[in-house]
Amino acid sequence: MSIRQSFWQRILRRHGFTRAESTAVAEEEMEQKRKPSGWKCMPYIIGNETFEKLAGAGLVANFTVYLIREFHMEQVKAANVVNIFFGTTNFAPLVGAFFSDAYVGRFKTLAFSSVASFLGMVTLTLSAVVRQFRPPRCPTTTFSNSQTSHCSPPSVRNLSVLYLSMALLAIGAGGIRPCSLPFGVDQFDRTTEEGRRGLDRFFNWYYFTSTLALFVSMSVMVYVQDTLSWKIGFGIPTVLMLVAIVLFFLGTRLYVHVPPEGSVFSGIVRVFVAAFRKRRLSQQDTPEMLHNPPLLNSNVTPLSLTPQFAWLNKAAVPSADDGGSPWRLCTLQQVEEVKCLIGIIPIWFSGITCFVALGQQWTFAVLQSLKMDRHLGPHFEIPPGAVGTVAMLGLALFIPIYDLVLVPAARSVTGIPNGITLLQRQGVGLVISVFSMVAAAVLEKQRREDSLSRGGRGGAGAMSVLGLAPQLLVMGVAEAFNGVGQIEFYNRQFPEHMQTLAGSLFFCSLAGASYLSSVLVAVVRRETAGEGRRSWLEDDIDRGRLDYFYYLIAGMGTLNFVYFLVCARHYRYKGGVDAVACDWKGGSEGGLRVEKSV
């Protein structure tokens, strides 16, 4: 035991702490002094994330087919079950983020959630292995014909096992998704140039490995499940999840553990309550007149006073009635953190529309492929569900090019460490997504005319499914700009103690895009049909006008980009005393303006 640690333990015992308590406090004090290891931790963190993605995506990529074939669910019911499950797993990170930031911390949340995911995978695999955990086999049930009275419906026991596995998987997703990336960010020292450069590359490579894992899962795993067996197709992801857990715990001695700092949401509410109570006080726009004590945590970026949302500044104005209550007097740091959140929300809304474009093109590409020639050579036929993985391939191939070629080239011109600003990266992605939808509409018009000329038959002789590749590759590039840009933006602009909440916001974008897509499809089908007209979105896409629907989404994307420009123009980057914030200001020359935060 070191002399320093013995000294602290004697002091703590003198003030009434037990040996266990003093040891815990001393260990926490030493933990906070541990220097971030940076890229030394990344094999464990990125390895854990890669294998977790391989396992999770490989398990649920073909989930709808599993419910129809093995649990004898009708297609509509199976789709609803899967939609509810996906919606839950995308909103669960909000709950996981709350508990992580407020009570548990990211390391413990990741550890618990990883085990929960593994148990969920084991349970789902058992449903495929143990005959009693699923309905009796029904030879007449196929993917295209699930409506049959000869099949036994799933029993209460069957559904209990199924829903238990889904619940455990949702719990796992709720902790892993919001914590994995912020936990990796914690391992870099953002006060050094080396740490900041390492963090810049971390975002790109984290997204690259995750996307590559998704691509492998949604192609190889789906093929195994369709051609070999569900037992093997579920067993492989379960083993991969176990590997992910082992990798994660192997790096324990290297990790920096950021302790939780209490409820994030209560701190936000306090600022609004204090500002409302002092609404009649005179406005104070100078930091000297506001409560601004020194920060106790050296890892937190000190925020300077900004003119936006100035009415919130009153929460930090000292008065005789405060009485030391945190509900009456907040710090300048707390006020500026709330301002950061308010400024981020409008930017967050713009990302939802981008994911709508990505999701709709992915969904309808499957239907288009059914009317196209999917053969690659005489012996191999591309599964319809694997067509959308081309977008993932485009994303995975483009990220290394962006990180190793485009960023250094742009940096030499702009002088910005990332080449372009965080908002510019998102904006480029929005523009590319619009072009991708226009290209998809043009291709769909050609495909429809070709299909109608052949009587609506797909297969050999029809337009090749490879015709969908360009638009999907471009959409992958759009996600490389906007999707990765969103993740980096949230993690850099959120206050440090809210990083887990920042991670959950990205998945809320995906959930919001899913629900908005459902509403959009329902409205378009209702409004474009009637009076002898066919809907744009018919069950047989040759009878509808999917190209018009694509043009509609492109128009929505254009309006969304204009909205994004307005939000970006008024957004102020979070910055400390020594931070340089790069703001996207459309000046007379359309150039960049680099502002020094003071």
Image (cartoon, rainbow, N blue to C red):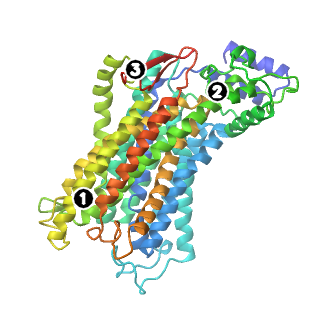
Q: Position of residue 266 (x, y in %)?
A: 72, 38
Of residue 406 and residue 217, the one placed in the foreground of this image is 406
Task: Name the residue type under label 1.
Answer: Glu
Real-space CA distance between mark 1 and mark 2, rounded to the nearest whole angstrom: 49 Å
Dot 2: element: helix
Instruction: Using the rendered image of the protein, determine whether residue 107 is visible from the camera's viewpoint.
Output: no
Dot 3: element: loop
Looking at the rendered image, the quarter that the N terminus falls into is top right
Q: Disc number at residue 24?
A: none
Residue located 34% across and 66% down the image: 536
Q: Residues within 10 Å of mark 3 (few under 14, many from 20)?
A: some
Name the N-terminal-most of marks 1 and 2: 2
Name the N-terminal-most of marks 1 and 3: 3
Q: Disc number at residue 336?
A: 2
Q: Position of residue 507 (x, y in %)?
A: 50, 46
Of residue 106 and residue 19, the one placed in the foreground of this image is 106
| Residue for badge 3 | 417
Q: Are marks 1 and 2 in contact (CB under 8 Å)?
A: no
Q: Disc number at residue 444?
A: 1
Real-space CA distance between mark 1 and mark 3, rounded to the nearest whole angstrom: 41 Å
Residue 235 vs 508, above or below: the answer is below
Indicate the quadrant where residue 561 lies.
top left
Q: Nearer the viewer, mark 1 or mark 3?
A: 1
Left or right position of 273 against 143: right
Of residue 351 and residue 122, the one placed in the foreground of this image is 351
Dot 1: element: helix
Q: Residues within 10 Å of mark 2 (few under 14, many from 20)?
A: many
Name the N-terminal-most of marks 2 and 3: 2
Residue 168 vs 93, above or below: the answer is below
